[in-house]
Image (spheres, rainbow, N blue to C red):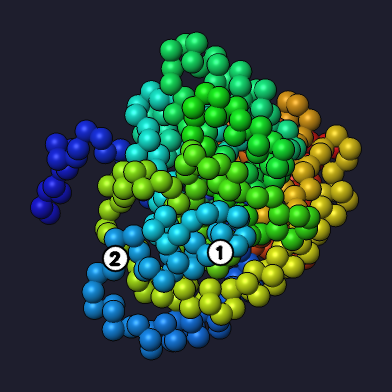
Amino acid sequence: MAEKFNYDSIFSKTSRDTPIGTVRHSKYDFAVAYPDPDTLPLDELIDSMKSGFEQEGRDLAYYSTAAGYPELRRLVAEKLARERNMKVGVDDVVLTSGSGEAIGILIQAMTDPGDVVLVEEFVYLGTMNQMRRYGADIVAVRCDDDGIIPSDLDSVITEQTAKGKKVKYLYTIPAFQNPMGWTMSLERRKQVLEVTGKHSVPVFEDDCYADLRFEGEDVTSFHSLDDTGRVVYVGSFSKIIAPGMRMGYMVAPQEVLSRAWGFKSGGAVSQFTALAVAELMKGGLDAHIELQNEALMVKRDAMLAALGENFGDSVSWTVPQGGLYIWVKFPEGTNLAAVQEQVFNEGVSYYNGSQFSPTGEGSNYVRLCFGHPTPETIRDGIAELANILNRIGTFTG
Ligand SMILES: Cc1ncc(COP(=O)(O)O)c(C=O)c1O
């Protein structure tokens, strides 16, 4: 047999072995942040594609404008102005392959190895992985149920500055935070802007869950509270249509957009998807979001009820007014990281807190996602989680 070619001497110095991996599912899957396939707007998408292609399908013969389909950017700008009070026009919006791509290229454009970047105490793993990849020194800021604690933010920046470090930016997920579930209050947002302003630190706002509110009042975006161009914003269609669409966007001053764009590979986003999303926005998207949010609230309630029935007073959890996550705190010393694989093999999956922490702390927390399973599955799965943890002696509450 011919000897296989060895690429070791070919790989670039900056390339890293990053396993492509496959997603594993358990019987009761509370780890994944997916929507329920039964609530996807498939019929509406089929209609949108049909009308989009009838009107503009011939344009697929060309490469799209670099920033992506102008009509979709216009619709996004309108939505952000209407719902997030942002003063933006079509030229302020660049479409990306999910918001994950926007996050990755913005991090590349704003991070050198060793730079300090600030995040919330527990934070979305995808962002943290990108920050690590580009060598950031990730520093956590403490949070409570209202979001980032401004005094802690101030001390962290002051401490880092005293060490001679430049704090590059604060990354925040202010609405239905992943994984903690809270939404930052208006008061806190203003205080966070004040503190970061004092130290000339930009705010990187990841608002991908903003539309998933099923209870309470909307809180305006960070972006709308600033008129100096100090907020960089990303959003996504993954949570309101489907992650498989791979459509997101970034909004930032032109100089930031063009730097980030320099790291985008493969040119503009898929025109095929952009046409379908634009047509859906003109048609049934708002009605779909409303229906999806009604379904999410039923699931949240099912999970809250099941947690109440199966876990005693020593366990506490957040009650999110939207989004996909409940953040559960077990007594100090409980190690849900050590048994995660075993619990997975017995049929229940979750992510534990240490996976979302820049310092690897928090293995007495779990993030439970209620977006994908049905209310019945949630009820049975939470009971099963309590059974397994009791049986293996991790938690006997
Ligand atoms: C906070 C946050 N930001 C960004 C993303 C990336 O989503 P997408 O790339 O599908 O838009 C996710 C995905 O779960 C997320 O939780």
Camera-side residue of 71 and 339: 71
Q: Assign a secondary structure to mark 2.
A: loop
Alpha-carbon span between mark 1 and mark 2: 21 Å
Question: What residue lies at 84% left-to-right and 44% top-to-bottom?
Answer: 311
Q: Left or right: 85 with respect to 55?
A: right
The quarter of the displayed image where residue 70 is located = bottom left
Look at the image and tell me whether residue 158 can be seen: yes
Q: Which residue is mark 1?
A: 79
Q: Three-letter amino acid code at disc 2?
A: Thr
Q: Secondary structure at mark 1?
A: helix
The response on whether ligand 1 sits within 8 Å of label 2 is no
Front-most of 27 and 288? 288
Residue 121 percent across, percent down from the top left: 62, 31
Residue 71 lies, in percent from the top left, at: 41, 71
Which quadrant, please, contains the N terminus? bottom left
Residue plotted at (33% across, 83% down): 57
Q: Residue furthest left?
A: 2
Q: Which mark is residue 65?
A: 2
